[in-house]
Image (spheres, rainbow, N blue to C red):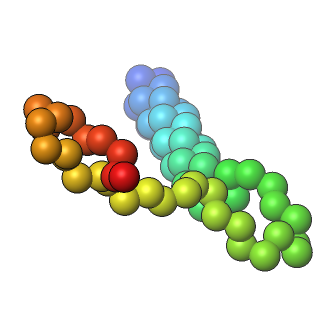
Amino acid sequence: MTEAGAGALREFLVVLALALVGLLLAVLAAFAPWYATPADAGGGAVVEMHSPQRPGPGSGGVAVEAR
């Protein structure tokens, strides 16, 4: 193998290793828990759900609180 061929092979292996490390980090970020929770948390809700209000008469299409 020539010196240029060995350099190209070494560069290819470095690029391949960096790609595998990046893929591993992406998988860890996707599947790791984002925040720590105690074991007995009971599945508390992260967000509250609210239904939208209907626009009131004469409000110009802006949602108002129901009375």
Residue 22 vs residue 59, the one in the foreground: 59
- Residue ID at (71%, 67%): 44
Depth check, front residue: 54 or 7: 54
- Give how far across and how far down residue 41 sits, in percent: 82, 70
> x%, y% of residue 34?
68, 51
Q: Is residue 37 visible?
A: yes
Question: Is 13 rendered above or below residue 42?
Answer: above
Picture quarter with the N terminus: top left
Residue under the image location 48 percent in, 30 percent down: 11
Q: Is residue 13 above or below residue 7?
A: below
Residue 10's x, y, as percent? Answer: 52, 33
Which residue is depicted at the point 54% across and 48% down? 26
Q: Is residue 45 above or below residue 43?
A: above
Q: Nearer the viewer, residue 1 or 41?
A: 41
Residue 30 in which image quadrant: bottom right
Q: Nearer the viewer, residue 5 or 15?
A: 15
Left or right, residue 43 beside residue 23: right
Please give left or right for residue 34 compared with residue 26 in the image. right
Q: Quadrant of residue 61?
A: top left
